[in-house]
Image (cartoon, rainbow, N blue to C red):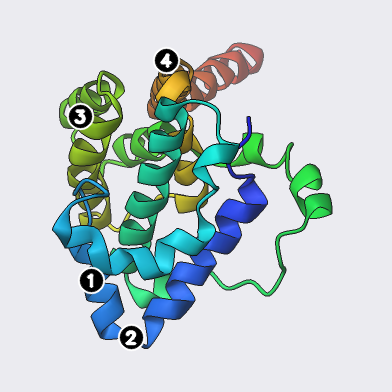
Amino acid sequence: MKGIPSITTADAYVDHVGKVTRNDPGRRAALRRSLGRPVADIGARWAHGVVAPWLPERRDVRGRRVYDAVESAYYTVAALAAARPADRDRETDQPATPEADAAADNEESARTNLGRVLGLAVRDGKVNPDTAEGRLHLLCRQDVAGLHRQLPGLIRLLQAKDVQVDLAKLLLDLSRWGIGRDEVAKQWLQGFYRAMNELKDNDDQDAARQIGQESEDK
C-alpha cells in the first residue's frame, strides 16, 4: 500500500534517528519528550526536523486514516529509537533503493513482531504472563491515537527487562494500523501465544523422547 514503508526503508529510518541523535543530547531529549504525544502537540514540535523529511506526501496517500497512522508511526518510532541506549543503535551504510525494497519483501516475514517479542519475554521469565497478556490485548483494542498513548508503557516494561523491540518492524505494523488493525493485532497475538508456549512444547517433546528411550531400554 502506498505510504507504508518497506522494511528496508524502515531499517534506514531507525538507523538515521540513531545517528542524528547519538551526539546530540538536545535532539535526543526532544524526541524522547514527544513519545506518546499527538503529532500536533506542542511537545512534538522539535521532533519535526528529524521526522518530516521521511514522511510521504499526504496527497500520495489515499485516505486520512491511512496517512494519520503512517505519520504517527514515524513519530513514535523516532521517539522510541531516541529513548533506547546508544549502544543499541543499529549501524548500516546500505541506502534504501527500489531494488533493495523489492528484495526485502520476503525479509519482513522473518522479522520479530511486538507480540512475539513479548511472548519470548514471558517464556524466558522476564515478564509476568498475566501482565503481558493483558497489556497486549489492551493495545490490540485501540484506535490509532489510543495505540500511541498505550504503547510507550509496554515498551518501557520490556526495556526495563533488557528486552529490545525490532523498531523497523514496529514502524511497519504501526503504519498499517489505520485500516489494517485487525490483521496486525492477529499477527501480534499469534506471535505472542506461539512464543510463550515454545518452551512448554519443547519440554513436552523432550519428555516424549525420554519415555520412548526408556521403553527401548527395557
Q: Give the residue displayed 70% in from the left and 42% down from the top.
A: 107
Counting from the top left corner in percent of width and height, residue 106 is at 74, 37
**Residue annotated with mark 2:** 24
Q: Are marks 3 and 4 in contact (CB under 8 Å)?
A: no
Q: Is residue 120 above or below residue 46?
A: above
Question: Which type of secondary structure does the marked residue at label 1 adopt?
Answer: helix
Is label 3 in a helix, a strand or a loop? helix
Q: Which badge, 2 or 3, comes first in the chain's sequence?
A: 2
Which amino acid type corresponds to the residue marked 2 in the rendered image?
Answer: Asp
| Mark closest to the chain's N terminus, 1 or 2 | 2
Type of residue at label 4?
Asp
55 or 172, which is in the foreground? 55
Quarter holding the C terminus is top right
Which residue is disc 1 drawn over? 30
Residue found 80% across the figure and 43% down from its top: 102
The x and y percentages for residue 154 are 22, 42
| Residue 199 visible in rendering | no
Q: CA distance from mark 3 to mark 4?
A: 16 Å
Q: CA distance from mark 3 to mark 1?
A: 27 Å
Residue at which label 3 appears:
135
Q: How far apart are the two marked residues, 2 and 3, measured between alpha carbons?
A: 33 Å
First in sequence, mark 4 or 1: give its number. Answer: 1
Q: Residues within 10 Å of mark 4 (few under 14, many from 20)?
A: some
Q: Closer to the camera: disc 3 or disc 1?
A: 1
